[in-house]
Image (spheres, helix red, strand yellow):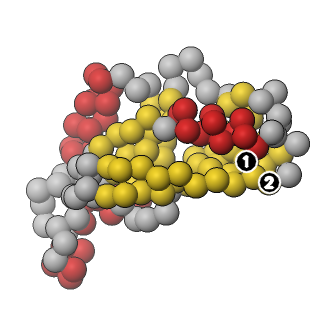
Amino acid sequence: MTYSETFSLNTKGFNDILDITGQVVAVANRSKVRDGLVTVFCPGSTGSITTIEYESGVLEDLKRALERIVPSDIPYDHNQRWGDDNGFSHVRAALMKPSLSIPLSKGSLALGTWQQVVFIDFDNRVRRRNVIVQVLGD
């Protein structure tokens, strides 16, 4: 059986990190699938789905690490070509990836105790984002 749902988020951009665990769990529950795989995907090229402990210290650590790896204040060819000054957001999203798969066992996501599913918006402006959750299994 396959079950899919989409939900929307309002984001602030600039590494806005939103805990979407509750929404993903709710979709998995509505699917009625007990054992299988949950895939969470964000369409677009400036957002990412990952897991992290949703705690203010580690969230700030991640933001600082991303700024060191992909600085927002250096020239990007994308900015010169398109003039939208969000080249850094495309590179960050490409490194972090747009999707995540989580095992579903006996109706529960196989997440660790401190592991939450998050959406990260790397763009340089406020956005309305869609997140697709697809559940596959029995």
User: Is residue 97 depicted above or below 137 in this figure?
Assistant: below
Q: Position of residue 108 (x, y in %)?
A: 72, 28
Q: Position of residue 126 (x, y in %)?
A: 25, 56
- Examine the rendering and report whether any part of residue 106 can be seen: yes
Which residue is under mark 1?
A: 135
Identify the residue shown where x is 35% and y is 50%. 10
Crowdedness near tag 1: few (<14), some (14–19) or many (≥20) residues, C-alpha within 10 Å: many
Q: Residue furthest bottom?
A: 81
Crowdedness near tag 2: few (<14), some (14–19) or many (≥20) residues, C-alpha within 10 Å: few
Identify the residue shown where x is 11% and y is 56%. 73
Q: Position of residue 61 (x, y in %)?
A: 27, 30
**Residue situated in front as seen by the camera: 120 or 22:** 22
Q: Residue furthest top?
A: 113
| SS type, badge 2 | strand
Identify the residue shown where x is 26% and y is 49%. 12
Residue type at mark 2 is Thr
Which residue is under mark 2?
A: 2
Q: Which of the marked residues, 2 or 1, is nearer the chain's N terminus?
A: 2
Horizontal side, residue 125 vs residue 117: left or right:
left
Q: Spatial distance from mark 2 to mark 1, Cα to Cα?
A: 6 Å
Q: Position of residue 116 (x, y in %)?
A: 50, 30
Residue type at mark 1 is Val
Horizontal side, residue 70 vs residue 47: left or right:
left
Horizontal side, residue 65 vs residue 44: left or right:
left
| SS type, badge 1 | strand
**Residue situated in front as seen by the camera: 94 or 129:** 129
- Examine the rendering and report whether any part of residue 98 can be seen: no
Could you say which quadrant of the image residue 29 lies in? Answer: top right
Identify the residue shown where x is 19% and y is 72%. 84
Q: Are marks 2 and 1 in contact (CB under 8 Å)?
A: yes
